[in-house]
Structure formats: C-alpha cells, structure tokens
Image (tube, rainbow, N blue to C red):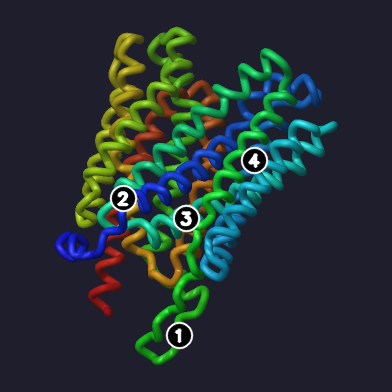
Amino acid sequence: MSPSSTADLPVAPLRQDAGVIGLVGLAHLTSHFCQLLLAPLFPWLKDAFNASYIELGFLMTVFFVVSCGVQAASGFLVDKYGPRPILFGGLALLATAAFGFAASPSYGSMAFFAVVAGVGNGVFHPVDYTLLNRKVSAQRLGHAYSMHGLTGSLGWALAPAVVVPLAIAFSWRVALAVAGGFVVIVFLLAWFNRSTLELAPAPKAAASSHGREDGSFDFLRIPAVWMCLTFFLLYAVALSVVQAFAPEAARQMHGVPVAMAAACLTIYMVCAAGGILLGGFLVADPQRCERIVALGFGAAAIVALSVALVPMPALLVPVMFGAMGFASGIAGPSRDMIVKKSTPAHAIGRVYGVVYSGLDIGQAIAPLVFGALMDRGNWQGVWLGLVVVQVAMIGTAVNVRKARRTVLAAA
C-alpha cells in the first residue's frame, strides 16, 4: 500500500485507537514481566530447592519451548474465535502460574508451573498484532507498534525491579505472589474494558485463482513468512546475547567495573525504548521499513564490532551499549511493519503466531552457542558472533522484501 493510499483511509477517533493500543500494550508488558519472574530469583530458588543453576535454567528452557509451540498454534485459535477470549485465557494462565510458583513445594512443581506459564505466554503476539492490525487506524499503526515494543521492554525492566526487593524484604514466595496479584489486576482491567477488545473472527479467505478458498495452512506457502520467522529467530539470538552475555564479555575485555557492567543492560534497554519511540515516527511511510531495519541493525553491528576489536576505556563501554540499544530500537516498529506487509488479512493470527515463535526458538538456542563461548573465555568471540547475527538480520529483512515482490510479480 502506498503512502498516498494510506492517507485516504478513514481514521478512527484518537480515543478509540488509544484505548486499543493501551490495553494491548499493558497485556504485552504483563507477558514480558512474567518472562523474567524466575531468573532474578535464582539465588533464592537455588537454596530453597537445592537446585543447580543448570536445573534452574532448565525451567526457563521449558517455559520458552512450550511458549514456542503454543505461539504457533494459538494463531489459529485467534483467527477462528477472535483475540479477546484467547487473551483472557493467557492472562488467567500467567496468574495461575505465578501463584503456583509462589506455593510450589518442590522443583518438580516449579517445572509444572513453568509449562503453565509457557502456555499462557504463547498467546500474546497473535492476540496483540491481530488487535492492532485490525482495530487501529493505518495512519497510527507505526505508533502502535512503537508502544507495543516499548511496553515489552518496560515489562522486562519491571520484573527484577519488583521481585528482587520483595524477595530481600520478605521472601521469594511473597515476591511471586505479588507478581500473581499484578497479573490479576491486569486481567480485571482488560475484563472491564472488554468492549474495547471486541473483534470478530478473521474474515474468510478469498477464493484463489483456481476457484477454491485458501486452506488454513496455505499461508505457510508464502516465502516471506519463513523469511520473517528466520529474522525473528536471529533477533531473539541477538537480544539474548545482549541480555545474558555481552555485559560480562565486555567487562572482561575492557576492564569494566562490575557495577558499571551491570548497568550496561539497563542503559541498553532505556536507550532502546527511546529508539522505539523515534522508530514509530520513521515508519509512518511503510515503504521504507526495510531500509530503516537495515540502517538500524547496521549501525548496531558497527557499534558491536567496535567493542569487539577497538581498545577503549571502561567508561566508554556503557555509552556503546546505549548507542547499540538506540539503533536497534529504531528498527523495532519497522520490523513489525515488515511482517504486516507479508501477512494475508484472513491469516493475521496464524502468521504472527508462526513468525513470532522464532523469538522463543532463538532464546532457546542462544544460551547453548554463546554460553559455550563464555565457558571458554572467548569474550571477543561473543561480540563477533553478535555482529554476525545482526548482519544476518539485515540480509533476511532484504530477502523478505524480495520474496514479497516476487509473489506480487507472479500474481
């Protein structure tokens, strides 16, 4: 769709669009908040269950593997029944899991509720993007994607800020119970504003050139869908490296003090949030989204390469994290627009479910590859690997555009 045709589309009242964006953003924040409930509490859980860090890490693996499968499958339910009931189910399961974690008497019980949490977490991207793409005015969609990404980052930042102080002041069980109460509050807010989330099931597919209606799995024949899945897998790998390994690797290479290295991730996330806000304005013209992605991750790759190869004072390292976060954040809304442009109107939930399952796959793969580099003390290899992944993301985004153009030309 060209910018001129976008400008001709009817615009819903700002209050209506803001209500949808706000509720979807709050749900997305809750999803990311629950993703980081357990990891900050590992020191307490290790003592409580006499578990190793490998066993505790396995809880996160269970969570993301289950979430991956559910995310791919839940898109079909969203398209068939509409997003609202699926959203309520996801929030209810996350609340159940948080209270279950808080009351767990054993490691096995924690693993069971990790499965419950994974099922609940898996519904959010198909639900969120179906609501945004079908209910928000096209002229405000870039800002909707921007707020969606921003609330996700805030959810990640909020989880440790809530559970760690509560665990220190009271106990890890109290911290998780409070987290469950927060999810219940979000559920109630969504329930009382359910009219804002009302949306009919996806429209049926138009008949193909052969005179038959597209099947439920026909979207899997679209090459751009698989390109988008690959892009999000790579994106998750890069994010996991930054979150888990890059600060420590930079500390070892450049003599960064421990406290300063710990602040690097916070600086990255804050600057990424600023980049996301700017990216919402830049993607107002959907035709340039691939170029914005290429420029954003290209700049991030240059920064990462500098950290890997250029000697620098310790004080400069947090600045480099901030620059890398800002550049990556700018690309965020355009990243989501790329998927929208590759998605048939009748299969929004299914496409987003499959594509965003790449996030869970990437988060499951990254610790295995980059954790091995860390164990060997290959700090530079961690950063060079991050550069390779970021460059690969640019190539994948360009190939999405080529695949989409090939389909249009054939049509």
Q: Residue furthest bottom?
A: 211
Quadrant containing the C terminus is bottom left
Indicate the quadrant where residue 274 lies.
top left
Indicate the quadrant where residue 166 lies.
top right
Mark 3 residue element: helix
Residue on which the image places disc 3? 196
Cα distance, mark 1 to mark 2?
A: 36 Å
Q: Earlier in the sequence, mark 3 or mark 2?
A: 2
Nearer the observer, disc 4 or disc 1? 4
Residue on which the image places disc 2? 14
* Residue 211 pos. (x, y %): 40, 92
Q: Earlier in the sequence, mark 3 or mark 4?
A: 4
Of the residues shown, which amino acid type is indicated by label 3? Answer: Thr
Report whether residue 65 is seen: no
Q: Nearer the viewer, residue 20 or 128?
A: 20
Of the residues shown, which amino acid type is indicated by label 1? Answer: Glu
Report whether residue 61 is seen: yes
* Residue 196 pos. (x, y %): 47, 55
Mark 2 residue element: helix
Quadrant containing the N terminus is bottom left
Q: Residue at x 45, y 75 (%)?
A: 203
* Residue 289 pos. (x, y %): 25, 51
Nearer the observer, disc 1 or disc 2? 2
Of the residues shown, which amino acid type is indicated by label 4? Answer: Val
Cα distance, mark 1 to mark 3?
A: 31 Å
Mark 4 residue element: helix
Of the residues shown, which amino acid type is indicated by label 2? Answer: Leu
Residue on which the image places disc 4? 184
Residue on which the image places disc 1? 213
Q: Earlier in the sequence, mark 1 or mark 3?
A: 3
